[in-house]
Image (cartoon, rainbow, N blue to C red):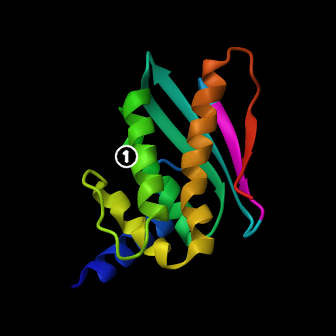
């Protein structure tokens, strides 16, 4: 099995059986994400213990890339502190937007399965929607009294 087959299998698996799917009630913070170009919509809810993500869930409807990305993201960030989440988000963004021939950065784990979207620039927004929505949820929690902020990847 070559690397592209492995990556495709990871995406298909997380699309068919998304991990951490559903809504956390109660939650400490949440945000809604929307990609109007393809119709992907999701909500990220999370519970914090101090500065660490104790639990995270997502719900919504989207394409296979969007759903798989959200599923992979929730697995990757559960248990991480904010600084680690920001570093990982930066790595993911760098990976998704780098030229196709670029080497993959270390530390992506299963998230590396999303690198195939580099060949299809219009799909980068599908893969990054959940990450932008998570960032909005964490920013909303940092501003006490703020309401759920919608995120758009237009």
Q: How many marks?
A: 1
Q: Is residue 38 left or right of residue 12?
A: right
Q: Is residue 48 visible?
A: yes
Height in image: 126 above or below 147?
A: below
Residue 118, image x, y percentages: 47, 72
Q: Residue furthest left?
A: 1
Residue 11 placement: quadrant? bottom left
Q: Is residue 25 magenta?
A: no
Helix, strand or loop under label 1: helix
Task: Give the residue drawn at x 73%, y 54%.
Answer: 34
Q: Is residue 141 left or right of residue 47?
A: right
Q: Is residue 59 left or right of residue 17?
A: right
Mark 1, other Cα within 10 Å: few <14 / some 14–19 / many ≥20:
some
Q: Which residue is mark 1?
A: 76
Height in image: 1 above or below 89?
A: below
Height in image: 30 above or below 89?
A: above
Magenta segment: 30-36
Residue 16, image x, y percentages: 49, 69
Task: Give the residue drawn at x 56%, y 56%.
Answer: 128
Height in image: 44 above or below 122?
A: above
Q: Nearer the viewer, residue 121 or 116?
A: 121
Magenta: main secondary structure equals strand
Q: Is residue 32 magenta?
A: yes
Q: Is residue 72 visible?
A: no
Q: Nearer the viewer, residue 98 or 74?
A: 98
Task: Give the residue drawn at x 74%, y 35%.
Answer: 149
Residue 154 placement: quadrant? bottom right
Residue 135, image x, y percentages: 57, 38
The quadrant the N terminus occupies is: bottom left
Task: Give the residue drawn at x 45%, y 37%.
Answer: 86
């Amino acid at each position: 099995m070559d690397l592209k087959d492995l990556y495709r299998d990871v995406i298909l698996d997380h699309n068919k059986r998304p991990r951490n799917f559903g809504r956390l009630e109660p939650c400490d913070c949440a945000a809604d994400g929307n990609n109007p170009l393809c119709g992907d919509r999701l909500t990220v809810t999370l519970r914090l213990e101090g500065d660490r993500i104790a639990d995270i869930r997502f719900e919504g409807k989207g394409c296979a890339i969007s759903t798989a990305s959200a599923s992979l993201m929730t697995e990757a960030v559960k248990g991480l502190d904010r600084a680690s989440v920001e570093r990982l988000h930066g790595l993911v963004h760098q990976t998704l937007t780098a030229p196709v021939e670029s080497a993959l950065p270390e530390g992506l784990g299963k998230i590396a399965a999303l690198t195939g979207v580099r060949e299809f620039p219009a799909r980068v927004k599908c893969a990054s929607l959940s990450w932008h929505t998570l960032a909005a949820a964490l920013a909303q929690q940092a501003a006490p009294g703020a309401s759920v902020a919608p995120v758009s990847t237009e």
